[in-house]
Amino acid sequence: MTLRAAKIDRKTAETDITLKLRLDGAGNGDIATGVGFLDHMLTLFAKHACFDLYVRCTGDTQVDAHHTVEDAGICLGAALKEALGDMRGVARYGDITLPMDEALVLCAVDVSGRGGLAYDPGHLSEKIGDMDTELVGEFFAAFCRKSGITVHVRRLAGANTHHVIEACFKAFARALAKAVAIDREHQDEIPSTKGLL
C-alpha cells in the first residue's frame, strides 16, 4: 500500500509551522505549538485517530493564540489532503457519539472534497489556560477549508468546558480515522457516483 503521509512547511509573518502526518500510524504525537491547551488537544487527537503527528510552531503568541491555532488547522488540513491523494479506497464516512465524563459529543465526517463545518459546542467558558475557547471553532473551520472535508461537531451534554472541548477533539479523531480508513472490499474505487472526490 502507498504510504499515506505528508509534510507541510508554512511560514508567514505570524507563524512558522512544520507539520508531519502519517495516517497509518501508531498514535504518536510530538507536538509543540507554544499554546499548551492546543498541544494537549493535538496529542490526544493523534492518539485517538492512530495517526502519527509531529508539529513545531513558532507563532506570535505575544499577541494571542489566534494565528497559531488557525494556522495549525490549516496545516493539518493541507497535510491530510495531501496524504489522501485521490481518496481512492477510503471509507469516506465516519461518525461517533463520544462521552467524556459528563460531556457527550457527536461528530460526523464526510471525506467529500467539499470542505464545510457545522460546529455547535454550546456555551463554553471564555478561556482554558491562555487559549480563547472560540479558537476551537477557528481550528476546525481552517482544517475543513484546507482539507475539503465536511465535519459536524455537536455537544449533546456537558457542563465542563475542558471536558466538552476534549470530547470534541477525541470524537473528531475517531470519526476521521473511520472516514479515512481503507475499505478493503473497495480499495480501488473512488467512493462517489461522480468518480471523483
Image (tube, grey):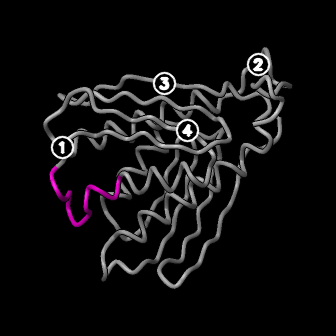
Please report whichever mark, 2 or 4, sits nearer to the chain's N-terminal start. Answer: 4
Nearer the camera: disc 1 or disc 3: 1
Q: Which residue is mark 3?
A: 95
Q: CA distance from mark 1 to mark 2?
A: 41 Å
Please report whichever mark, 1 or 2, sits nearer to the chain's N-terminal start. Answer: 1
Residue 118 relative to residue 19: left or right: left
Q: CA distance from mark 2 to mark 3?
A: 19 Å
Residue 180's tag is none
Residue at image location 86% in from the left, 25% down from the top: 188
Residue 150's tag is 4
Rate crowding at label 2 as few (under 14), some (14 to 19) or many (20 or more) other CA atoms within 10 Å.
few
| Contact flag, marks 1 and 4 (Cβ < 8 Å) | no
Please report whichever mark, 1 or 3, sits nearer to the chain's N-terminal start. Answer: 3
Span highlighted in magenta in the image: 125-136
- From the top left corner, tell me how far across and down residue 111 is, in percent: 63, 35
Q: Which residue is mark 2?
A: 184
Rate crowding at label 4 as few (under 14), some (14 to 19) or many (20 or more) other CA atoms within 10 Å.
many
- The secondary structure type at the circle numbered 4 is strand
Residue 47 relative to residue 24: left or right: left
Residue at image location 32% in from the left, 39% down from the top: 120
Rate crowding at label 3 as few (under 14), some (14 to 19) or many (20 or more) other CA atoms within 10 Å.
many
Q: CA distance from mark 2 to mark 4?
A: 23 Å
Q: CA distance from mark 1 to mark 4?
A: 23 Å
Residue 11 relative to residue 43: left or right: right
Please report whichever mark, 1 or 4, sits nearer to the chain's N-terminal start. Answer: 1
Towards the viewer: 17 or 109: 109
Q: CA distance from mark 3 to mark 4?
A: 12 Å
Q: Quadrant of residue 66?
A: bottom left
| Contact flag, marks 3 and 4 (Cβ < 8 Å) | no
Residue 121 relative to residue 16: left or right: left
